[in-house]
Structure formats: structure tokens, C-alpha cells
Amino acid sequence: MERLRDDHLGIEVVQANYFEQASLDAAVEGIEGLLVLTTTGLPEEPAMSNLVAAIRKAGCLIHMLRVVGMQPDTNLRRIPQPLRDFGLGLEIQHPIARQVLDDAEMPVTYLNVGASYMDNFLRMIPPLQQDSLLPWPDRLVAYVDPREVGEAAARLILSDDARHVGQFYTLNNGEAPLRTSEVARMMSEVFLRRIRHDGSREALDGYFKPLVDSGLVPPGVPDYLWNFFLYEEANAPVWVPNQFLERTLGRKPGTLRTWLQEHRHHFSVEDKGAASAAPAFPATAPSSAIDGIWDCTVSTPVGKDPHELVMRSAPDGTLSGEMTNLKNGISMPLQNGRIDGDRLTWSMQLVKPFKVTLRIEVGVDGDQLTGQASAGMIGRAAIRGTRRT
């Protein structure tokens, strides 16, 4: 509360408890506009019932906004039994809240966040810094900046258009949903170092283990989240990009890429001194003619293999980075890298399907790269690449 007062001088700050009626009565006294958010796991039926009682006692509410996170036209019968057994997750909790408020005939507008909050990725800082790893299940998700959800709520609560009352608005940033693996590639482009994605259950458990061991997260949460992500993926088609947020804000909402660019300093390995298997790059735009990420193809006897090439130049003319075969996921660090004008050379140690040293020589012309990989008696393979922008 003290921080709120310090950050927002001149505002009145009061504290209430959903389960202490007297504190709720005092909090809503004289309130005409109300924005309601609740934490995950809150027992919504008694909480919202107590809030309704306080609102009726005050008798002055004109408009309530309630933030929820649920599928449009949610059918509770579609919710799998393991999620029901867990209890008060979002897919159970928020329909209960909506039922209580609708039955009480509150003047409510629902802001349904049909997307993942972008700042959820701030919880991923440790694995992204230490291991350049995004350990999150691969499912299709839309995204939204929570700051813009807050701004939309403020605009609606200050609006004199009564047609908003009783509506159920689903909010996202209007962009096509992204798979988590796509987000990892986007992070690689923005952070200028390769971010690996692992959507396995083992990776999820590994992320939560220190949190569970320290008591910060209940032991059942990983099981619940894994089942929730499966449920979310099975119902992904319901999340359709829309322009409601754009119309309300009067501008296009921010994209996940712009959010990552704004916050990339939080994920930097240089400032934290964290170990990373991937090469570290500065969080600013590349200054060299070759720094960045390149999409490459290597022509082999059995076809063209797609590769991701990450390169970083040093003032002394050395070259570092890594090259990843996108078919099999094998990454090889660039060794003995040298820059001679627009000519680049390096070597790599291939271990699968056989062990051999590859010697690479390419030339760079703007955003195009051409050259070849030599492997002794095995022969040569042509390389072509285009810089990502």
C-alpha cells in the first residue's frame, strides 16, 4: 500500500479482504466505477457474493469491469476431470465468478483475456539466462501486454457509453497466435543468441523443481499446469485474433516482438554473469556487417538441410557463434573463426552421423551469404544464407 501511495501521489488507497464483509463495505463506499481482478485459486463464490452484498449496501455503483480468463462460451462439461479435481484453476474459477455476478444482475462488463500476458515470460528469466532455454509446452497461444489491458479498462470505465454494460469482450493484440517454439525463435532474433525450446514434461518439471523444493509453489501445480496446457492446446481454435483492443485504445496494440525488444535487458546474460551454452551477444542492434542470425541451407547429397547460423564479430577480427541443423537439432559452435573483409572462415566438429571436421568458407554481400563446407575426402557442400531482419 505504501508503494502505491508513493507511486501515485494524491490517490486514496484502502485495503479490503473479500472474506471480511466490513472491510469490503468500507472499500466500495461511494464507488461508482469498479475494476475487479482476483488471484488464481480464489474461492469465487463467497468472494463475489460478499462483493455483491457490499455494492448493494453502498447503492452507488454505475459500472463494474471484471477481468476473467476463459474460453468464449465456455462449456464446463468440456473441462477434463483432472482439472476439475484440482479445484480452483482459471477454467473453473472464472465461470463461477461470472455466474454469481450475472445472477446478481450487476452492471458488469467482462474483459476476457483471451491471450497470455507477455510479462509471464519474466518468470522464465533463470532458465533463459542460465541455459538459453525456454522450458514451456509447445501450444498455440495469443499474446497481450497487460499494460494495454489496464489502459483499455480505464477507457471503458470512464466511458459514458452504456452499451458496454453486460458485454463479454475477449482481448488479444490482434496478431496471429504463436507456438512456444516460434516464440523461442523470436527470442533468438531479439536477444541475438540462440534460445532453445523444450516443451517436454521433463523440462517443465525441471523448471518447477526449485520452486516446489523451496515451498514457493505447491507440489501439485506442475501436474495441474501440464493438464491445463493439454486442455488449452485441444481448444486452441477458439482463440481468434480480434480488433477490440485496437478500437478501444485507438492504436494498434504492441506485438510480442516489441515487448521482447523493450525488456530484453532483463534476459541479458552479460550483466548477470550467467553461464550459457550459446554465445553471448550485446542487447543492442548489431554494428557489424555480419552480426546476427542467418537462415541458411546446406546442399547435401540427399537434399537441402535448413540451418540457423548465429554469428558475432570481435574487434580483433575473430568470429564466434553457433550453427544449428533445424532438422535434427544438432548445434555446433564456430571454432577458429576469422573475418577477412567480406570473407569468413571457421571450422566445426560434426559428431553425428559420423565424426568429422567441417571447414567453412563463405562470402557476405549485404544480407546474402554464399560459400561452401568442406569435409576432407567426403567432399563439399554449398551454403547459402539470408540474414534475418
Image (tube, rainbow, N blue to C red):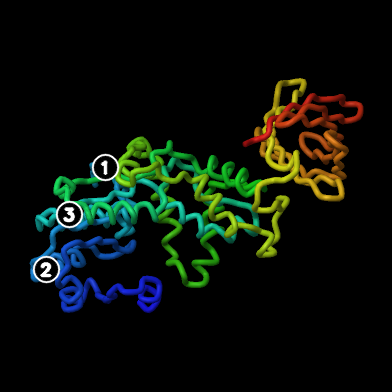
Residue linked to disc 2: 53
Farthest-out residue, right: 377
**Residue under the image location 73 percent in, 51 percent down:** 279
**Residue under the image location 81 percent in, 30 percent down:** 363
Left or right of 94, for residue 235: right
Q: Quadrant of the N terminus?
A: bottom left
Tag 3: amino acid:
Val
- Which numbered disc, 1 or 3, marks the residue that appears first in the sequence? 1
Tag 1: amino acid:
Pro
Callout 1–callout 3 Cβ contact below 8 Å: no
Left or right of 355, for residue 70: left
Residue linked to disc 3: 108
Measured Cα–Cα span from mark 1 to mark 2:
27 Å
**Residue under the image location 46 percent in, 44 percent down:** 255
Measured Cα–Cα span from mark 1 to mark 3:
16 Å
Q: Please tell me which residue lies in front, 234 or 106.
A: 106
From this viewpoint, is residue 202 visible? no
> Viewer-nearest of labels 2 and 3?
3
Q: Please tell me which residue lies in front, 209 or 9.
A: 9
Residue linked to disc 1: 72
Q: Quadrant of the C terminus?
A: top right
Question: Helix, strand or loop at disc 1?
Answer: loop
Give neighbour class at mark 3: few <14, some 14-19, many 20+ (Cα, 10 Å).
many
